[in-house]
Image: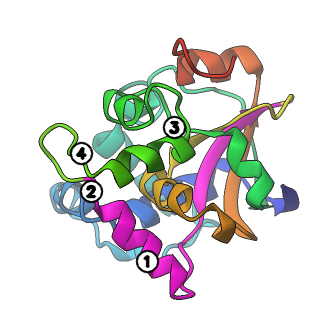
Amino acid sequence: MRKIKSSNENEMVYEFLKMEINSDRHRKSIESVLKEMQVSKDIIVNGNIISEQENTLREEILRSFRGWRNSKLFENFPIEIEWVWTEFDREDILKIMYIEYSYWNELSYYTGSPLEAAKYVLSGKPLYDMPTNGAIKDAQWLIKGNKFPPMIFLTDESEERYVILEGHGRMTAYGLVPVLFQKVSVLLGYCKREELAKWYGEMPNRPK
């Protein structure tokens, strides 16, 4: 992993929303929040992270959409985080973990590892009555030479593990073709170890 340049929380919120509004799973939820707030989606797809007004609105969108700072995905989320743009390579994939969540737990055989999740995907078994072959299609897209947009991870000072905040589906695809996990752009947040563990959770078979 190589550090490229410094970032900040405003940019993280912006990038998170920008990735999620392009996903099939979350697009409608974000669009519903935007409609309720009477805000144009330009604030997400073509925003300005220097604008305090836009940053405040984006935080409100993320709060309504994902529970920013105090609930849902962001329950027990670390308070003090240093954000850095980084570039990840193949050897880093061994330390990348899904967040503790029922779907990702079962997909990865309770290890949190995208590499183990790839084995589940290749087995052809559904999960929660849903097919998992979407990751295979994404991996095939990578094989054709395409690139995914950036992902967002969290870690602590030890850098023993990198926990996915945004990009679980993309990492599953990389788990299928780890040789292509090279020069991957990641917005990485550094926080205290105890705060990371409080948010991330601990599973029996996961690295401590």
On the picture, is 191 further left or further right than 132? right
Q: State the extent of the magenta-drawn residues as a range.
A: 132-156
On the picture, is 50 further left or further right than 20? right
On the picture, is 88 further left or further right than 34? right
Residue nearer the viewer, 199 or 83: 199
Pointer 4 and pointer 1: residues touching (CB < 8 Å)? Answer: no
- Residue that label 3 marks: 98
- Residue that label 2 marks: 26
User: Mark 3 or 4 closer to N-term?
Assistant: 3
Real-space CA distance between mark 4 and mark 1, rounded to the nearest whole angstrom: 19 Å
What amino acid type should be assigned to the residue bearing mark 4?
A: Lys
User: Mark 4 or 1 closer to N-term?
Assistant: 4
Real-space CA distance between mark 1 and mark 3, rounded to the nearest whole angstrom: 22 Å
- Does residue 93 show up magenta in the picture? no
Q: Residue at x 37, y 54 (%)?
A: 122
Residue farthest to the left, as pictured: 129
In this view, the mark in front (3 or 4): 4
In this view, the mark in front (3 or 2): 3
Say how the picture is coloured.
rainbow
Residue nearer the viewer, 38 or 12: 12
Q: Residues within 10 Å of mark 3 (few under 14, many from 20)?
A: many
Percent position (x, y) of residue 149? 54, 72
On the picture, is 57 further left or further right than 123? right
User: Mark 3 or 2 closer to N-term?
Assistant: 2
Locate residue 20: give its quadrant.
bottom left
* Residue 43 visible (yes or no): no
Which mark, residue 125? 4
What amino acid type should be assigned to the residue bearing mark 2?
A: His
In this view, the mark in front (1 or 3): 1
